[in-house]
Image (tube, rainbow, N blue to C red):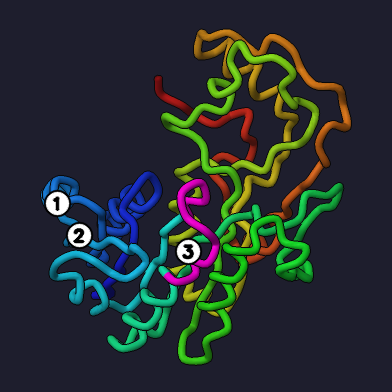
Amino acid sequence: MRTVSIVGLGWLGRPLAQHLLRKGLLVKGSTTSTEKSVSLKAEGIDAVVLRFSPHPEGAGFGSLFVADVLFVNIPPKSRVNSDSFYLEQNKFLKEMAKQAGIRKVIFASSTSVYPDADIEYSEDYPLTNGNSGSPGILQAERLWFEDRDIQCSVIRYGGLLGVDRIPGRYFSGKDNVVGDTPVNFIHRDDAVRLAAWVIEKELFGAVFNAVAPIHPRRRDIYERNAVELGFPAPNSYAPGGTMPSKVISSEKILETGFKFDYPDPMDFWYEM
């Protein structure tokens, strides 16, 4: 039976672990608190406490690296720490993984690595530290992806939404909201299924954008959220052209046979 270890059992990592368990895989993972690790163990997830500051801190986390696949899911806290801090976190994690013999890795990245421009971006767009929208994340991607001892796939997630993350709620009652640009969202259910698909189909050594293939305008989603979920829509919208109409292509993952359950962000489900 294959074992998957998930570094970061949070809003995305925990439902991914639950999904993989239902598929019959053994699942391990890390969290940052003892309380969370107890509740995760009750769900059948072998959870350990692991923090990076940027060096690793915790107890018993060596067992995390006895696995067939490592899913790296430690989003940068840019408001608190620098890009160099995030890169150091990943350096420590990669060294521990390699020492333990991990050879297959999925790195959870972000479409924020693409520049803000009126372009439809595919995975082969030539990114550099100079043109990237998130050079710190790009450097971490390359740290993993370019290591010849590891088969690494990078999943560049778009805006992770659904369930309790409701885009219209963030802008409810606000003025001068950007509304005419297309969205690059993915529902959490599809984000989980896409990661599991990469593991199941052994799609290692590749970069995939993870974004719903339909890109409605922001204002259309905000207005629908307001009507369906019962809160005020934005008070006013910014003039058109305030932000670039950046679009992220999901064609590459679709070509592997993956199908989105929620291809249109207008149809995402939420709970209040």
Secondary structure under badge 2? strand
* Disc 1 residue crowd, few under 14, some 14–19, many 20+, Cα 10 Å: some
Residue 66 appears at what percent x and percent y? Answer: 23, 79
**What residue is at 48 percent from the left and 34 percent from the top?**
162
User: Pointers 2 and 1 in contact (CB under 8 A)?
Assistant: yes
Q: Which mark is residue 34?
A: 1
The residue type indicated by label 2 comes to Val
Badge 2 or badge 1: first in the primary sequence: 1
Residue, disc 2: 49
Q: CA distance from mark 2 to mark 1?
A: 6 Å
Q: Which residues are magenta?
A: 76-88
The vertical placement of 36 against 91, above or below, is above
Residue 121 appears at what percent x and percent y? Answer: 77, 57
Residue 55 appears at what percent x and percent y? Answer: 32, 70
Residue, disc 3: 86
Residue 244 appears at what percent x and percent y? Answer: 83, 41
In magenta stretch: residue 79? yes
* Quadrant of res 235: top right
Q: CA distance from mark 3 to mark 1?
A: 23 Å
Badge 3 or badge 2: first in the primary sequence: 2
The answer to whether residue 31 is left or right of residue 159 is left
* Quadrant of res 17: bottom left
Quadrant housing the N terminus? bottom left
Quadrant housing the C terminus? top left
The residue type indicated by label 1 comes to Thr
Badge 3 or badge 1: first in the primary sequence: 1
* Quadrant of res 30: bottom left
Q: Which mark is residue 124?
A: none
The vertical placement of 37 against 184, above or below, is below
* Disc 3 residue crowd, few under 14, some 14–19, many 20+, Cα 10 Å: many
Q: CA distance from mark 3 to mark 2?
A: 19 Å
